[in-house]
Image (tube, rainbow, N blue to C red):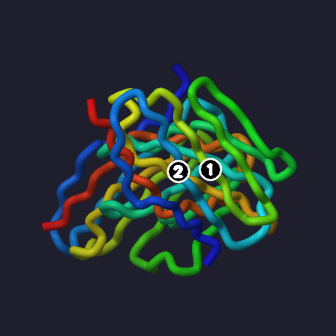
Amino acid sequence: SQQGEEDPQALSIQEGENATMNCSYKTSINNLQWYRQNSGRGLVHLILIRSNEREKHSGRLRVTLDTSKKSSSLLITASRAADTASYFCATEGNFGNEKLTFGTGTRLTIIP
Amino acid sequence: DAMVIQNPRYQVTQFGKPVTLSCSQTLNHNVMYWYQQKSSQAPKLLFHYYDKDFNNEADTPDNFQSRRPNTSFCFLDIRSPGLGDAAMYLCATSSFAGETQYFGPGTRLLVL
């Protein structure tokens, strides 16, 4: 299975601190994406990073990609209570099979 | 606003009673996906359509079927729901395969 593993499974931090989540995957990819899911809701796309990119920023989000280690990290700076959610990485393999494979997710709790 | 709509948001059915979940999109995207997500797990892809081309995941049970009568609509039919089919069902779309996916709010299915 190409399913990614996310680390940690759960993370609790104080509001204002930075949160870092990691994702590892098994096979070569075209791109890696991060999604957020609030409890009982659909997923919301956060950022997409392509295999030839090493770092991307979007507001308080910073994503890095290391294809040699088959890993990615998502950093949320200056966390807010509203950032409480589950975060999933998803990879598009370079098989041309038109689908994403989601990781196991990190449950982030921001303590006010 | 362009979006992905799922109806109903909550569906209760009886063991063995067929049920249909619906998804519509105003994004005019080529690709539509159906995922099953159980509590605290990653979304699991059931099917996807690239335009009218249907793609079934190898491990999707025969009990699950899908229809895409036109670009905007996609349906998930569960012929004989079992207790193990209780889950959140997520519909998503993307303009091109492997790119950013846009999710609906999900339908939570309860099987009694």
For disc 1, the marked residue is: A73
B84 horizontally vs A62: left or right: left
Q: Nearer the viewer, residue A36 or B83?
A: A36
Tell me where residue A56 sits by quadrant.
top right
B6 horizontally vs A44: left or right: left
Q: Secondary structure at mark 1?
A: strand
Q: Nearer the viewer, residue A68 or A95?
A: A68
Numbered mark located on residue A21 in the image: 2
Q: How many badges with numbers are in the image?
A: 2
- Which chain's residue wears label 1? A
Residue at the image position 49 percent from the left and 76 percent from the top: B60
* Residue B71 drawn at (x, y percent): 62, 42
Numbered mark located on residue B47 in the image: none
Q: Looking at the image, can residue B36 be seen?
A: no
Residue at the image position 27 percent from the left and 75 percent from the top: B84
Q: Residue furthest left?
A: B112
Earlier-in-chain disc, 2 versus 1 = 2
* Vertical order, A67 against B73 (above or below): below
The amino acid on which the numbered mark 1 sits, given as a three-letter code, is Ser
Q: Residue furthest right?
A: A52
